[in-house]
C-alpha cells in the first residue's frame, strides 16, 4: 500500500536555506552599511581634528607674536615708570607722541566649538582630545586678561594727562594704572609662553594672522613687531599743553 503522507522535508530544507541566504544577505548589507557609516563618521572626525589643529596654529601665532613683543612692553613700562618718577618731582608730565600697547587679538574657537557640538571630538585619539580640550579651557581666561591689559594701555594714552601739570591724585591714578599693567603683562607673558609650548607639543607650528604676503614667515612677524609703536623709542617734549 502506497503511503499518502507528504514528504515536505526536502521542501523545508529548501525554504530554510532560502531564508538563511536572505538573512545572511541582510546582515552583510547591514554590516557594510555600518562600516560605511563608521568610515564616514571617522572621516568627519579626522577633518574636524585637522580644522582644530589649523585653528590652534593661528592661535599659536598670536601667542608667539605676544612673546616677541614682550621685551618692548617691559622696556616701555620702565620708561613710563621713570617719567612718572620725574613728574612727582616737577609736577609736570611731558608730551608723549605715542606710547603704544600690547596686542589684543582674541584667539579662535569656531572649529573647536563645531567639533564639540557635533560630537566629532569623541572619535579623536584620547590624548589629542584631552590635550586640546585643556588648551581651549586655558585660552578663555587668557583672552579676558589680554583685553583688560589692552584697556589699561589705552588709559595710559589719555591725552588730557600729557603735557600738563599733574596733581597728587593724577600721579596716584597713573601709578595705579602702571601697577596694573605690570601685573597683566607679567601674567599674559607667562600664559603666552606656556601656550606656545603646549601647542608645539602637539606637533603644530605657528601660523600668523598678519597679512603681509601669500605666506607670512616668522622673520616678517619679527620685523612687524619691531616696527610697532610699542617697540619705538618714546618721543618726548617738555612743552606744556595750552
Image (tube, rainbow, N blue to C red):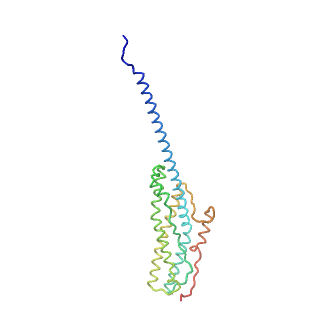
Residue occupying the point 50% across, 46% down: 40
| Vertical position of residue 31 compared to residue 90: above or below | above
| Vertical position of residue 12 compared to residue 95: above or below | above
Q: Which residue of the protein is positioned furthest toward the bottom in this rendering?
A: 242
- Image x and y of residue 189, in percent: 51, 67
The residue lying toward the viewer, choosing from 169 and 241, is: 241
Quadrant, the N terminus: top left
- Image x and y of residue 218, in percent: 60, 63
The residue lying toward the viewer, choosing from 174 and 139, is: 139
Hey, which quadrant is residue 224 in on the image?
A: bottom right
| Vertical position of residue 94 compared to residue 192: above or below | below
- Image x and y of residue 94, in percent: 54, 84
Residue occupying the point 46% across, 86% down: 167
Say how many tags the image has: 0
The residue lying toward the viewer, choosing from 71 and 159, is: 159
- Image x and y of residue 204, in percent: 55, 56
Residue occupying the point 45% across, 50% down: 122
Q: Is residue 228 left or right of residue 117?
A: right
Amino acid at each position: 500500500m502506497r503511503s499518502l503522507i507528504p514528504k515536505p522535508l526536502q521542501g523545508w530544507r529548501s525554504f530554510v536555506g532560502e531564508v538563511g541566504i536572505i538573512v545572511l544577505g541582510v546582515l552583510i548589507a547591514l554590516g557594510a552599511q555600518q562600516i560605511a557609516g563608521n568610515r564616514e563618521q571617522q572621516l568627519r572626525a579626522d577633518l574636524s581634528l585637522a580644522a582644530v589643529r589649523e585653528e590652534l596654529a593661528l592661535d599659536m601665532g598670536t601667542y608667539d607674536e605676544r612673546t616677541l613683543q614682550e621685551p618692548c612692553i617691559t622696556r616701555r613700562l620702565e620708561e613710563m615708570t621713570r617719567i612718572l618718577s620725574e613728574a612727582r618731582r616737577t609736577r609736570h608730565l611731558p608730551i608723549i607722541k605715542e606710547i603704544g600697547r600690547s596686542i589684543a587679538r582674541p584667539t579662535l574657537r569656531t572649529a573647536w566649538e563645531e567639533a564639540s557640538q557635533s560630537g566629532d571630538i569623541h572619535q579623536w585619539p584620547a590624548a589629542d582630545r584631552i590635550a586640546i580640550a585643556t588648551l581651549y579651557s586655558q585660552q578663555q581666561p587668557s583672552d579676558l586678561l589680554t583685553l583688560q591689559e589692552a584697556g589699561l594701555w589705552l588709559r595710559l594714552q589719555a591725552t588730557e594727562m600729557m603735557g600738563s601739570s599733574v596733581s597728587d591724585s593724577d600721579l596716584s591714578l597713573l601709578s595705579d594704572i602702571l601697577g596694573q599693567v605690570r601685573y597683566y603683562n607679567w601674567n599674559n607673558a607667562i600664559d603666552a609662553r606656556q601656550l606656545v609650548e603646549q601647542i608645539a607639543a602637539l606637533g603644530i607650528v605657528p601660523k600668523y594672522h598678519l597679512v603681509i604676503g601669500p605666506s607670512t614667515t616668522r622673520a616678517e612677524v619679527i620685523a612687524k613687531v619691531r616696527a610697532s609703536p610699542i617697540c619705538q623709542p618714546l618721543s618726548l617734549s617738555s612743552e606744556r599743553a595750552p
